[in-house]
Amino acid sequence: MGKRRVVLYGNSVIIGTVGTSLRRSPQYEVIPFSPVQQNELEALAPDVVLFDLEAAQNEAVFSLLARHPALLLIGLCPDTNLVKMWAGRQMVELTTKGLVEAISKQLMTMEGSH
């Protein structure tokens, strides 16, 4: 299986920090993405989208999830250290501590279904 594409939607510090951690793993292609380019988000065909829950302009990530239910959507709240992860129609709340492990687990599950 090729690299999984992880899009960092936004430019908050927390998104950048998680992106730095993910770049250490050879299984991920990490792509920074500006919300200004929201019409181009779908063209990237991401497996995972990380975004700041408190930022404006998150409509694009939720509309992408509606069209691509296999997408793993992860919202981070920098003020509370809260993580909300949508996989299909399910939503799970985590702390940022277990985020990279949760992404890896979900992507391994997705690989098994291909």
Image (spheres, rainbow, N blue to C red):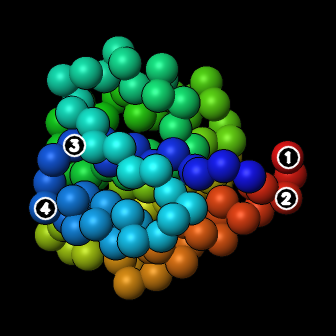
Q: CA distance from mark 1 to mark 2?
A: 6 Å
Q: Secondary structure at mark 4?
A: helix
Judged from this view, the residue extending furthest toward the right is 113
Pointer 1 residue: 114
Task: Tell me if mark 3 has few (under 14), some (14-19) or many (20+) residues whose alpha carbon lies within 10 angstroms of its own.
Answer: many
Can you name the residue that lies furthest to the top here? 39
- Distance from disc 4 to disc 1, alpha carbons, whole Å, reads 34 Å
Q: Which is nearer the N-term, disc 4 or disc 1? A: 4
Question: What's the amino acid at mark 1?
Answer: His
Query: For residue 9, which quarter of the picture?
Result: top left
Instruction: Tell which of 28 and 8 is nearer to you.
Output: 28
**Marks 2/3: CA distance?**
30 Å
Tag 3 or tag 1, which sits nearer the N-term? 3
Residue at image mark 4: 13
Q: Residue at x 72, y 65 (%)?
A: 108
Relative placement, left or right, of 95 versus 12 is right
C-alpha distance separating marks 1 and 3: 29 Å
**Which residue shows up at 85% across the image and 46% down it?**
114
Q: Is residue 51 above or below residue 26?
A: above
Q: Are marks 3 and 4 in contact (CB under 8 Å)?
A: no
Mark 2 or mark 3, which has the lower sequence index?
3
Q: Which mark is residue 10?
A: 3
